Image (cartoon, rainbow, N blue to C red):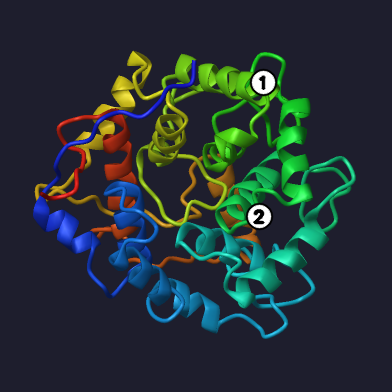
Amino acid sequence: MIGGAVKAHAPSKAVLDWLLEEDQPSVRFLTLTQLLRRASDDPEVVAAKEAIPKRGWAADLLTRQDPAGWWVAEKSFYRPKYLSTNWMLLILSDLGTTKDDPRIEKACELRIERYARPDGGFAMEGAKQSHHCTAGNMARALVRLGYADHPKVVSAFEWFVKTRDKNGGWSCFGSGRNLDSWEAMSAFAAYPRENWSEEMTRAVELGAEFYLQRELHKQGGHYEPWYRFHYPVHYYYDLLVGLDFMTALGFGADPRLRQAVSVLKEKRRPDGRWNLDAVHPDVEGAMSEWHTKHPKHRPVPFAVEREAEPSKMITLRAMLVLSRLGTSDSPRPPA
C-alpha cells in the first residue's frame, strides 16, 4: 500500500541556514515549504516565492527566454540538449516557478500544443506516438508549474496506466522494463492524490514493486553513474532519483531500500551537506563510446552549480528523502 506521512527530526542548523540563504530564493522557498512545511501564506514563504523570478537561478533562466516563449530556437523545443525549451522548463519546474508568471505560461502553452499526441501522452518533435520518458518528464513539470487539471495532463496520466507493463513499470526504449524508465513514477509523485484513479494507484504500486525488487540499483552489472548524484537530472537515473520518488510515493519503510539509503548517508559530507557529483551526460559503456565516436551529437552539459562542490539542490533532495524516512537526520522547524 502507498504510505502516508512520517515524523521529522532536526538537521544541522548550519546546513538549514545555508539552504535558507536569500541569494537563491528558489531553494529558500522549497526549504520553507517542503522541508520545514511552512504554510503558503507564511510571510517568509510569500517573500521567497515573490523573489524567485527576480534573482537567482530561475531569474537567470528566464532572462534567456525569447519574448515569443521559447529558448534557443523556435524550430525545436528538444534540441539542442540540454539548452532548449524542454530542458529549461524542466529546471524551472524544479525551482518553484508556476504559470502565475506570464513567461512560464506562454512557454507551457507552446510546449503542450507541440508535444501533445492523439494517443493521450506527450512526445518530442517528429514522434507520432507518445514516449514514456518525455511524457513522464513533461507531466511532472506541468503539474509543478500549475497544470495538474489541464485536459492534456490528465490524459497523460491515464495514458501511463494504459501503457504500463502488465507486471509493473514502464519502458522508454521500446520493450523491457528498466530502472532508467523512472519518469512516470516521478510524475505520479507530483500528481495530487485526489486526482488518482484506482487504476493509477495500482499502476504505481506495481511500478514501486519493480524498483523494490531491484533495490533501486540491481539491473545488469554495476553501473557507477547510478551512484553519483546529479542536477539537472534530465532523463537520467541515479539512486537519489529513485529514493526521491519512492519516498515521496510513500514506500520509504520498505527494507529493500536500505542499501540505497546507506549510500545516501555515506555520501554526506562531514559538514552535513552533499556534493554535486557529476553533470550529465555522465554515462559509461556503449553510450560513452557512442559520444566519443559522434562528438557533434554529444549533449551540451548544463548546470546551475559547480561539480564536486556542495550542492543546494542535491542537499535539499537528500534531506527531503531523510525527512520522509523519519530518520534522526531529517529536519524539523526550529523551535
Residue 271: image location, x then y, percent: 10, 51
Of the image marks 2 and 1, the number of the one nearer the N terminus: 2
- The circle drawn on residue 147 is 2
Residue at left offset 23%, top offset 58% = 310
- The circle drawn on residue 198 is 1
Residue at left offset 10%, top offset 53% = 13
Residue at left offset 28%, top offset 58% = 311
The amino acid pointed to by label 1 is Glu
Left or right, 182 with respect to 46, comes to right
Question: For residue 22, what is the image quadrant?
Answer: bottom left
In front: 224, or 255? Answer: 255
Can residue 114 be seen here?
yes
Q: Is residue 226 above or below residue 141?
A: above
* SS at mark 1 in the image: helix
Question: For residue 265, what is the image quadrant?
Answer: top left
Residue 192: image location, x then y, percent: 56, 40
Residue 277: image location, x then y, percent: 32, 52
Report crowding for label 2: few under 14, some 14 to 19, many 20 or more residues within 10 A (C-alpha): many
- The circle drawn on residue 282 is none
Residue at left offset 34%, top offset 66% = 305
Residue 45: image location, x then y, percent: 34, 64
* SS at mark 2 in the image: loop
Left or right, 75 with respect to 224, comes to right
Left or right, 240 with respect to 71, comes to left
Question: For residue 222, what is the image quadrant?
Answer: top left
Can residue 277 be seen here?
no
Report crowding for label 1: few under 14, some 14 to 19, many 20 or more residues within 10 A (C-alpha): few
In front: 229, or 322? Answer: 322
In front: 297, or 235? Answer: 235
Q: Are marks 2 and 1 in contact (CB under 8 Å)?
A: no
In 3D space, how far apart are the residues under numbered discs 2 and 1 (Cα atoms)? 21 Å
The amino acid pointed to by label 2 is Tyr
